[in-house]
Image (cartoon, helix red, strand yellow):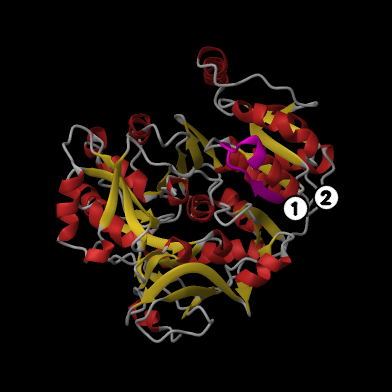
Amino acid sequence: MEKVWLKRYPPNVPAEINPDQYRSLVEVFERSCCQFGRRNAFANMGYGMTYGELEQKSRAFAVYLQQELGLAKGERVAIMLPNLLQYPVALFGVLRAGLVVVNVNPLYTPRELEHQLKDSGARAILILANFAHVLAEVIDRTEIQKAIVTEIGDLLPYWKARVVNLVVRHIKRMVPDYSLPNPVGFNETLNIGGDRRLQPVAVGGDDLAFLQYTGGTTGLAKGAMLTHRNMLANMQQIVAWVGPAIREGEEIVVTALPLYHIFCLTVNCLCFVRYGGLNVLITNPRDIPLFVSEIRQWKFTVITGVNTLFNALVNNEKFKQLDCSALKLAVGGGAAVQQAVAERWRAMTGVPILEGYGLTEASPVVCVNPIDIGGFTGSVGLPVPSTEIQLRDDEGDEVPPGERGELCVRGPQVMRGYWQRPEDTARTIRDGWLLTGDVATVDEQGFVRIVDRKKDLILVSGFNVYPNEIEEVVIGCEGVLEVACIGVPDEKTGEAVKVFVVRKPGVELTGEMILTHCRRQLTAYKMPRHIEFRDSLPKSNVGKILRRELR
């Protein structure tokens, strides 16, 4: 496909980036620590950690892994933490030791955790004490040789740490009993490593940095092999894209989505460490009142999120009272941003949500709306620098301009493949092209619109119905807070459209009101045939509504 999108690039955004500008993520990290040593790098629960402190603590953790545990270059270390100061210390410590990070969702069940640990072959794990009982159930069936346990307050100042850990463990009783073989405390590892020197490890672009597991929507979760070069490339692509709006050493980014998720890992953590920015870590973004109270103290300049997070914020009275005058960028990803939410956000903050598109296998960013966009576009933007795209039909042939097809991506951010799964890799990457499984269109300027996942298609009497379109219409009905759409079996039409709706608090809303609204915007075969009201909808760890669970 011709790169028509280059003509729409904002000024000063290059067509290409140099993915080999840095040797590794370690080089970027150490450069920033040297340049911004006295500036806060991460903040959590009212306490900030400077780049200098982060360098020292991550080096101590790297020494412990390297010398006390004897882990060799390329071995895997799992990190099972929410957004706490311990996360970046561990992340960069693992990378500095020449090891591979295996990010683990802290809310995993024993079955899910066992699969990921066994599949990755992780030799050590850093885990929050709140979830250690889950690990205790499966550790004997994995290759884990050392469990490193931390508590929520461990890196806070001494007395605050004592109080926080006491409350969490004994008053809120958030730490179930567990028994692990010879666990070690996180702070103990820092004390051990802090007295020794780190032995330099030669890490290059082709070395693995992450085994980033996919959500497993088509079966067991698979580990995407992301190299240092993959992650550096995507970091450089994002830096090139938003660079004109960013000032080194000055930005404050609200990090509400979990750092173990690829979106927040790359966009918030890696990119803003590169910029010398401050990541304000939100440990529990689902507690919106606490979330708002935490960010009230910061003149934040950037915020990232998913549609459900932005929706929750624009419906929160205290958020409406926040001073957002310093805000420069709001970036949405992970799921489609709905127009009603985007317009309310823009009206409330004065800043549009820059919707983007990506996937774990692409480190993750593929497309983003330009920073000079005026408002909601209904698209996920333009391909970022050094990225090629194609739309293909079911036979693998490129479709004519303007038609729908499977989005295929090629660029330096595309993963090496799936860990120990050559057959899955061969089905997903062909001749260097990543087959995303997402149906898209591209307009004459190069703006990409994601129609839906191929597997989410609803077939009504032979006509294709795309859930995103139905959800976009229903959310515009007054009184609708959240909506999800799926297909259900139907004797007459094969499948019928069903929507699940969450009402706004205190609002009267009936199924007939929704149908009346939909009739004005949807043709007959797209009309919902079933409407179910619920108090809430199932969501992933980053807030994406899970249609598969509704099925």
- Which residue is pictured at 34% across the width and 60% down the height? 468
Lateral position of residue 10 relative to residue 228, left or right = left
Assess disc 2: are there few (<14), some (14-19) or many (≥20) residues with their C-alpha within 10 Å of its C-alpha: some
Reply yes or no: does residue 532 show up in magenta.
no
Q: Nearer the viewer, residue 508 or 472?
A: 508
Give residue 132's quadrant in the image: top right
Marks 2 and 1: in contact by CB < 8 Å?
Answer: yes
Secondary element at tag 2? loop
Give residue 353's quadrant in the image: bottom left
Magenta segment boundaries in residue numbering: 98-112
Sequence-wise, which precedes: disc 1 or disc 2? 2
Residue 137, image x, y percentages: 71, 30
Residue 442, image x, y percentages: 37, 77
Q: Nearer the viewer, residue 73 or 463?
A: 463
Q: Marks 1 and 2, Cα distance to the nearest angstrom?
A: 8 Å
| Residue 410 visible at all | yes
**Above or below, 233 relative to 149:** below
Residue that extends furthest to the top in the rendered view of this protein = 171
**Residue 72 circle label:** 2
- Which residue is pictured at 57% across the width and 57% down the height? 218
**Above or below, 256 relative to 426:** above
**Residue 98 circle label:** 1
Lateral position of residue 519 relative to residue 263, left or right = left
Identify which amino acid the numbered label 2 is placed on.
Answer: Ala
